[in-house]
Image: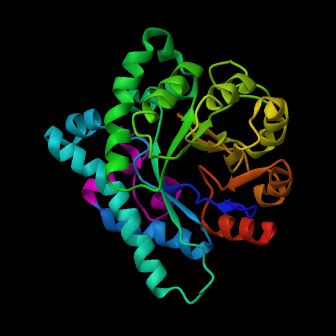
Amino acid sequence: MGSSPFILDGGLATELEASGFQLQGDPLWSARLLHTNPQAIKDVHYRFLQSGSDVITTATYQASIEGFVKYLGLRPEEALQMMMSGVQLAKETVREFMSHSPESDRREPLVAGSVGPYGAFLHDGSEYTGAYEDKMTLEELKDWHRPQIQCLVKAGADLVAMETIPGLKEAEALVEVLKEFPETKAWLSFSCKDIQNISSGRRFSEAVQVACRSTQLVAVGVNCCPASLVKPLLESAKSHKKADLSWVVYPNSGEKWDPKTGWIMEKQKSFAKLSLSWKEQGALWIGGCCRVGPADITALKQQLHV
């Protein structure tokens, strides 16, 4: 893949909210707009491409077949199409962007099909603890994730972004399901609560070892955590990572989300500045998560000189 980092996009929902859409408290989050306003999603994808993103992530993080049936009243076959539309919208946007792009050396942007944790569907905050893992078998977790991954692959995603995963059992389930799609590449990214541990309390180094069992992953890493945690987390697990597996890193802006009061705390040191150390640590996939907008991605690209 070369040594020049792939610049990811930022927070899709953040940008949609900045455009006036009310997403907080919605069990489908930004995925509802796949149904109600797909053009708004394309507009955000386009802004990130203009900012220099090499990878566009689909609006399917909180999407599921069951969720679309339950919250949109769709039939299962319609829900499958809705899931696939997330990839189709992103691919259409890439095509439109490239047809208008004056840069002949512009990297062809990739579309990453987003797969969030089971806890995102539960819509009870458990995606940040992984508490549901104890009540579910590996097979149940595999059965849950399979239809979503199948739709993203069938729709032509360039790779699958298995992201904000809080626990080891769910990571194992995702790696197992991925084997059922042997031509598909993916990254596996964990939510973390401190400088050594993923959200469930297990070590990030253990999570990296789970990722290393797969031959289909292009990267393993962290997302949706404060940028200041990234460097020590990567440091804590570097001896467990295979040489041919890159790091993927896309933290949030450093603000914290409080369900009662909203976002609190001002931005920490610019993650664009911090990104140089991540690149030095071997991160080849770098971007942002919640509260990271197109201007932040532009700054990131300039900082990394790519």
Colouring chosen for the image of the structure: rainbow
Is residue 29 a member of the stretch shown in magenta? yes
The extreme bottom residue here reads 102
Read off the magenta span.
13-36
Say which quadrant the N terminus sits in: bottom right
Residue 26 visible within the image: no
> What is the x, y in percent for residue 72?
21, 43
> What is the x, y in percent for residue 182?
44, 40
Residue at left 24%, top 38%? 71
> What is the x, y in percent for residue 41?
39, 63
The extreme top residue here reads 135
Say which quadrant the C terminus sits in: bottom right
Give the camera-side residue of 154 and 279: 154
Give the camera-side residue of 238 and 164: 238
Q: In which quarter of the image is residue 200?
A: top right
Is residue 119 a member of the stretch shown in magenta? no
Q: In this view, does 298 lie above or below 61?
A: below
Residue at left 54%, top 40%? 163
